[in-house]
Image: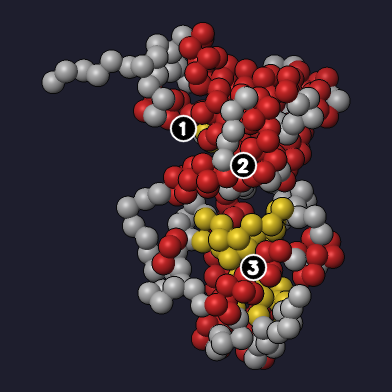
Amino acid sequence: MVKRTKRYAATNENLLKYALAPTMRWLIAAALDGSTMTYGAVKARLETEEGFSTVFATRIGLVAGALMHRIQKADPAAPLINVLVVNQQDQMPSEGAGPFMARRFKNENLIRTDYKQRHPAKWREYFDRAAAEVYAASAEEWALLYQKVFDTSLPQDWIAAERDKRHNGNEDDFGAGGRKYGPGGEGELHKSLRLWVTANPEKLRRSCKGARSETEVCLDSGDRIDVVYHLVDRTIVLEVKSRISNDVDLRRGVYQCIKYRAVKAAMDVRENVPVEAILVTEGKPSGEIMALLRQHDIRHFNAPLVRD
């Protein structure tokens, strides 16, 4: 069997020339999903998808740091997307992220190579702040930044495809992915309510005004959430049930909220950043459903039947 020659030798020169753009695209997808990439995951994709020979894991720090330097050259105020490259063990970035966080948060102590080890709680605090800024940016903002950095467009359908790729597997269980709505597909009433909830976060809660709002958001579990509101201090997952839903469907909605909240919280590497859940209906649920919502600390919003 003939051994295929790799496209690039994993030299520093080649990594700086050919690895930064794909790494930024992968990190944008992770950021929009509220997730991260391990050093090993970046290494593996550079080798299998970009044609690099074996990349030593220690060189991924070089890639992440060089990428952030290039981003800051184009936009000094850009979110620190490099912090999403994390260690597998502690799910936090290595000491190489320290100088970037030091400048962002005006704390020179973060530059010290032993700061993470000596002050893990403080390191976590600053990492959480940096990750919150990254998660708050929209797909449109990332595409504009990518254009500035690499002088190449990043179409929204490319971003969507990369996000889908993160969740591709061999199965698509009923209730997840493309089969969430069953063999009949999504009904018009559900779709109308879902899109209204996505477009009007401030009408559900005044504190949600300005939230980055997305619909049909895929989780790493393979599930798909109707709507997610991304805020700096919290994330809100929303399950939508239209006026035709009966108690069986509403009960299912409660348990969907429980599951989505748990998985979204597990995906978010920040500590002490709450994930809340809201069940949205077009009618007042029964006493049984309301009791179930209270029992599991899930909020309820009764959407108006007539909407702008």
- Measured as percent of width and height from the top left, residue 289 is found at 63, 85
As drawn, the label of residue 31 is 2
- Pointer 3: residues within 10 angstroms few (<14), some, or many (20+)? some
Q: Are marks 1 and 2 in contact (CB under 8 Å)?
A: no
Give the distance between the C-alpha atoms of the residues marked 3 and 1, in whole angstroms.
Answer: 34 Å
Residue 202 occupies quadrant: bottom right
Q: Amino acid at mark 3?
A: Leu
Residue most toward the left?
A: 1
Residue at (68%, 27%) from the top-left corner? 148
Up the image or down, 173 lies above or below 73; here it is below
- Measured as percent of width and height from the top left, residue 248 is found at 51, 86
Residue at (74%, 40%) from the top-left corner? 133
Q: Which image quarter is the C terminus in?
A: bottom right
Residue situated in front as seen by the camera: 121 or 292:
292
Residue situated in front as seen by the camera: 243 or 176:
243
Q: Are marks 2 and 3 in contact (CB under 8 Å)?
A: no
Mark 3 lies on residue: 195
Helix, strand or loop at label 2? It is helix
- Measured as percent of width and height from the top left, residue 167 is found at 45, 49
